Image: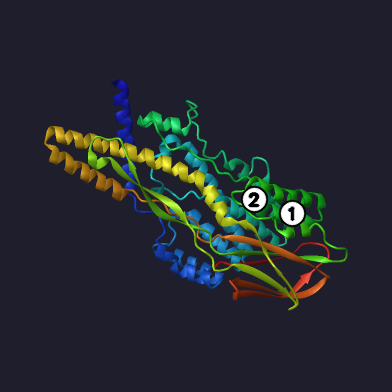
Amino acid sequence: MAKSSARAKTILKTLKITFLAFTIASCSVSPSAYEKIDSAVEETNFESAVNIIRRGQEKKRAVYSQRNSILLFLDKGFLEHYAGNYAASSADLQTAERLIQEAYTKSISEGFLSYIINDNTKEYPGEDFEDIYLNIFNALNYYHRGDLEGALVEIRKLSESSGKLDLLARKYEYTDPKTGAGLNEMARRETGVRQMPQIKTAKFSNSALARFLSALFYLGEGNIDAGRIELEQVYRAYSANTNIYRGQVPRAVEEIQNIPDGKGRLNIISFTGLSPVKEEQIILHHLPFHHPVLQIAAFKLPALVQRPSRITMVEVVVNQQERFYLELLEDIGAVIIETYNAHYSNMLLKTYIRTIIKYSVADVIAMEASRQQDSLAGLMAAIAARTAMDVSENADTRMSRYLPDKAYIGGINLDPGTYSVIINYYSGNRIISNAVYNDVIVRQNGLNLIQSVKLR
């Protein structure tokens, strides 16, 4: 009896905190706020997109609220990079990285309670894939600023032992420091429900894109052995993550190791398309409560939705003579979906726990109203409680919108000199866009790299 009473007090206390959180206005950025930014991105006018964000933050009601600071620095940081504002991009991405780490540390210190507060009422903590790719793009920031060592430092944050990729699989294995119980066990103990959704792990342990860039940076420094080791890791990434890397390793990975004497290697990397975004998904689920109105719950969860790219092929033309096509190195959208799986199952468990707690209290109230008054009073109480709970639940669809969907690579061996380069973007057999680079200097030694971005 005492145990049941204590459990009831725990549930009621948690419910009060949860409902208090629901009184906070939604933290999501309004979809309409992105329209002008999206339009500028579609036109590859990244400088304009950055300025739209800046002006939006100067308004009385900023586009990105304080609770969405991580989103602000991610979106602005990626767009600054595409615009060629590499120092500003580094500053933004480093701030985002620091805030993501602080948010993760805070979520651990909050313990079990943090798992039953609606995510949409809290500060946006960032996603794992955002924390991974901000280092990759910041590495490119350092390269463009002439700092290869700084670029390698950013890559090592991902690839070294106990780096971000190494820790990803264990990130959601929360354990109560007092009892040693895992999250599923704690959930069963607090709610009394024996069957709980199981936490999944992210099956992504190595990034071919990060390894390839690392190899380029090492080779650019003249560190042949380190470059070779990183290129070997590209092959390992493909073999260890077949759910993401489903094609052949691009020829460029082998070719950069076999540059003929007297030649310089011109490397091309191109980012295309836009990565998936979150949309609210409603899942109906049966719950074991007495009152019929409370036996079917609507779980509102964020699901990733693809944004198909019009670009199907990327061609490089050098001096209007030499032509070659880029090959897919990393499907960034697939990486995002895979790394999101672990977080999604974690959110499903939290939503399940939160719903069980709220519906159990509503069930008690409805049954008590039926006992003290009549069945109609119980029905009205159940309907009112369910309506309030359904309205209070909204999926947290926040995420950075401006990561690319695909990373293509390729290259060509040339005599040292100056060249003109055109990168053509095809949709089927038709060129829909291009990027022109004049006076491209190709050196025999050092790193020669062109980066192009078309987010359509």
Three-letter code for the amino acid on which mark 1 is drawn = Ala
> Considering only vertical position in the picture, is 378 above or below 56?
above
Q: Is residue 23 left or right of residue 243?
A: left
Q: Is residue 265 left or right of residue 326?
A: right
Farthest residue, direction bottom: 320
Q: Using the image as rendered, state which of residue 34 and residue 56 is in the foreground.
A: 34
- Outermost residue, right side: 261
Q: Earlier in the sequence, mark 1 or mark 2?
A: 2
Helix, strand or loop for disc 2: loop
**What's the amino acid at mark 2?**
Ser
Can residue 130 be seen in the rendering of this structure?
no
Q: Circle 1 sits on which residue?
A: 215
Quadrant of the snapshot with the N terminus:
top left
Residue 423 appears at what percent x and percent y?
A: 66, 72
Expressed as whole percent of the image width and height from the top left, the position of residue 262 reads 87, 66
Residue at point 66% right, 50% down? 238
